[in-house]
Amino acid sequence: MPLRPDGATLAGMKLALALAASVFAAAPSALGAGPDPSLLGIGFICSAEQSGGSSGGAIMPGVGNGGARADTANPEAQAWFENALDLYHAFSHDETKAAFAKAAALDPGCALCAWGVAMSLGPTLNTQMTDAERVEALAVADRAATLVKPGDTRTAGLIATLQGRYSREPAAGGREMAYGKSLDALLAKNPGDAMIANLAAHALITPARQDDYSGVPRAIAILEDVLARKPDDTAAIHYYIHATEFAQKAALALPYAVRLDELAPGASHLVHMGTHTLMRVGRYEEVAVTNAQALKVDAETRSALGASARPLTQRYYTHNYLFGLGGALMAGDGPLAVKYADHAAVAYPASAPEERRTMAQARSLVALGRYAPRRALAVADDPTAPRLVRLYRLYARGEALASRRDAAGVAREARAVAALSAEAAKAGETGNVTLATIMEGVLRGRAAMLAGRPAEAARHYDRAADTQEAAFPVPRNFDPPPWWYPVRRSVAAAELKAGRRAEAAAAARASLAEWPHDPLALRVLAQADAKGAAANRAEARKVWQGDLARVTLDLT
């Protein structure tokens, strides 16, 4: 039986969807209104699909609160400068460039406006720059230096940091680290300057994308100082979430992360951003709902900018989609997970960029396999489809057959995954081979559990879990997780069914250490170890959005 009845697969939800879309479309906080988070998330996605209209050319509201003064007497230029700075910290990269350019055009004598244009051409935590862009940015920074008013040492200092950042020869230790240190030195001359502090922190954590975490501790100290004075500073919260992730101290950011969507409701990336923390601390349903809200904001932003492209052309749309889908699956929210799956077909038509369409389509099949088995089994094989999609189709079929207790059918899909994995290996598709190894192990484990061979299942699951943990270590792979759940919890379930309670408890604890508050792992732990069983069982019921009793050990 499916984990939750799919009926005519949620056909009866249509009225609820319409209600959610109308009642909750403008809700300021993902879980701050309405009695049903699942319905709220579905409503957000419905709104994303229905967004329309255009009012391009206007300043974007609700994208941050870090406004700072520019050296201009032109109020319109000042407004665009403030908006551009907020957009920069919200990672609305293209919009940032356009807004700084607008400010500079309104006041050609504004040095900080020109500085903003130059800064926006450079890298961010999530973007790179070409050498041609560096040359262009340096020219703009040099021009900005000629506009500095007499005695304005702060502006001169900001521009000088960019001139160093874009110099022909990179500084020792890399451009971004040197840039961050120069901003930190400028901050020492301007203590309490939140604008400089946030820029410095961002620059200091940017090298972490290349595995250089040396600037992270200083960035955390800078940001904690900003937040002590201004706890609602959206830029500081954004970078603090990233910095604490990099430091493997994500929970430190939780008091700020839970409010970021309310503080910047017009910035899809900031609406989403708190879910980086929420995912790491195990608040999975909030991850699902808040990312649905981010999709809605993405779609509305695209409409407001007057673009004819679909929302998925937004840089972070797929990122938000995968985060939200992963949260729904971990929370056991079948209706919302299936809505995410259905949204893939709407947001990613054949004309969409292939890489994004492939990823969304492939991962969405997990939701069908777990919560709409009839639909998963009805998906026909397309030999021309990307191999990743074909692999996920087989995996989803295996999960669907497992829900029907068809051990032979699950084993058949596992063999098909292995065959497709061999083709991927011949083609040098390392990533697909890794995922296929996990898929095959999970399905062979499911088949063995259903056949009453839990000790064998534990071995299959253990190999899959080892592959997952080696390829996707949690500290670097919750952005979002490349695989939808911790296979170590399946090891725990198999050990429990085999009567090895101590081993089951150890595996469950190991799983929970990296995927905290996973309700299915908590339930196994409650059954395996009487100590704390009542609390673990209660926590599992609180986190899981469906009926825990319907998820057997064979499907855990």
Image (tube, rainbow, N blue to C red):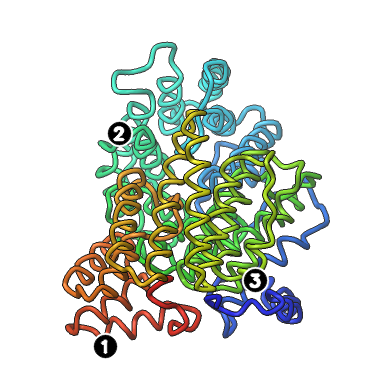
Residue 359 x/y as whole percent = 58, 46
- What quarter of the picture does the C terminus occupy? bottom left
Residue 383 x/y as whole percent = 67, 41
Crowd band around label 3 with a 10 angstrom C-alpha radius: few (<14), some (14–19), many (20+)? many
- Tell me the number on the disc at residue 27: none
Quickly name the residue at label 1. 534
**Residue visible at 61% across and 43% down in the picture:** 315
Check disc 3 and report its element: helix, strand or loop: helix
Between tags 1 and 3, which lies in front?
1
Q: Amino acid at mark 2?
A: Asp
Q: Amino acid at mark 1?
A: Ala
- Tell me the number on the disc at residue 42: 3
Between tags 1 and 2, which lies in front?
1
Q: Amino acid at mark 3?
A: Ile
**Residue visible at 59% across and 39% down in the picture:** 93
Q: Quadrant of residue 140?
A: top right
Residue 498 x/y as whole percent = 26, 73
**Residue visible at 35% across and 43% down in the picture:** 471
Quickly name the residue at label 2. 212
